[in-house]
Image (cartoon, grey):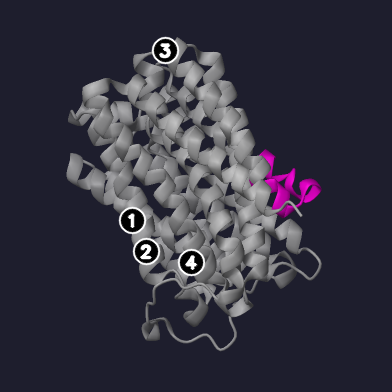
Amino acid sequence: MTVRRSSGYLGAAGAFAVCMAGTTLPTPLYGLYQEQIGFSELMVTIVFAVYAFGVIGVLLLVGNVSDQVGRRPVLLVGLGCAAAAAVAFLAEQGLPLLFVGRLLSGFSAGLFTGTATAYVLELAPAGRGARAGFVATAANMGGLGLGPLLSGLFAEYTSHPLTLPYLVHLALLAASFAVTWALPETVAAARPLREARPRRPSLPPQVRGVFVPSAIAAFAGFSLLGVFTSVSPAFLAQDLDVHNHAAVGAIVCLAFFASTAGQLLVPRLGESRAIPLGCLVLIAGLALLALSLATETLLPLVLAALVGGAGQGMGLRGAVGQVAGASPPEAHGGVLSALFVVAYFGISIPVIGIGLLTGPFGLTHAALIFTACMAALAAASGIYLLRRHTP
């Protein structure tokens, strides 16, 4: 049975959210893995970076393959990678399988991020393009937020914290596979998957003018999310004495849900203004994060998740809208994949930097150095974009 095209974009968004939730499931569980396996905080950031580089590698190598073979086959392969990642975590007996699980999670996110965004936009009925843009980015950020929330609850209130989250995720992936299989294809004259010829993401001439400012905003916003998903659990436990896994998952989840809320402001602001304003709101979130780190207090960290997440959401939806709007339909997948390559460099590079600085400076001071650098980047981006759009 084929899902009706008029409602198909919601089914694609649901599969998108389920896949992305799997990529953040381990976030509140890193402390448990550290106790079970025994590794340093630097290794936590390396494990996280393995995921980010898995995403980047897939986006660089096969980011535009869905423009050739169709959206649906690529998403089905992505769901398969997500299921394999869950199996690796279930079988985990040490760091090697932890690395394998994170790498496969990165593959699944890389296959989904640009392709699913394009698929949701293309499946949307005529006249609902703006709504579909919100649905796509909300599925991305909402799924990332649901992952730590669910695993945190399982870790705190069940006796199988390292298995139940992945069993539930496998069940959701099976349902998502069935929905995606029933969706119609949107790429005309799609070729068989075996005929795919990977090409590096490229930018059509008409996209280049809007791509650079959009990518800068995406880099800055994703860097904040990288801290919340990789470093904040350790900061909460070591400096704020918060050991409740559900609370840790909820705080991380707030940043992603606030991102979804920030996206709702974009239609009123307009995409071109949402990007620079999002950068400015992001700076406020980074300032609150620095305050929490410096004073070792919880409330500014919660506010940082809310404010910083909202700024990231404004910038992301504005960036996706600007880039997708300037891109010809036959290049949607590749152009959006190129945007997310830059965004995921924003997650990986600062997080690795914090891990390297934690040894000589400690986690708190390393994160403060990070916030200062990212605030400077966001400020430069915001000023540049505001001047660019000033008549």
Q: Secondary structure at mark 2?
A: helix
Q: Amino acid at mark 4?
A: Leu
Location of mark 1 (residue): 54
Location of mark 2 (residue): 58
How far separated are the C-alphas under marks 4 and 1? 16 Å
In primary-sequence order, the first of circles 2 and 4 is: 2
Q: Main secondary structure of the magenta part?
A: helix
Badge nearest the viewer, 4 or 1? 1
Location of mark 3 (residue): 240
Considering depth in this image, is 237 or 22 the residue closer to the camera?
A: 237
Location of mark 4 (residue): 75
**Quadrant for the C terminus in the image:** bottom right
Q: Residues within 10 Å of mark 3 (few under 14, many from 20)?
A: some
Residue drawn at (25%, 43%) of the image = 98
Badge nearest the viewer, 2 or 4? 2
Residue drawn at (36%, 69%) of the image = 61
Please give left or right for residue 315 compared with residue 301 in the image: right
Please give left or right for residue 184 compared with residue 107 in the image: right
The segment highlighted magenta reads 259-275
Is label 2 in contact with label 4 (beta carbons under 8 Å)? no
Q: Amino acid at mark 2?
A: Val
Considering depth in this image, is 301 or 155 the residue closer to the camera?
A: 301
Q: Amino acid at mark 3?
A: Leu
* Vertical placement of residue 223 versus 188, above or below: above
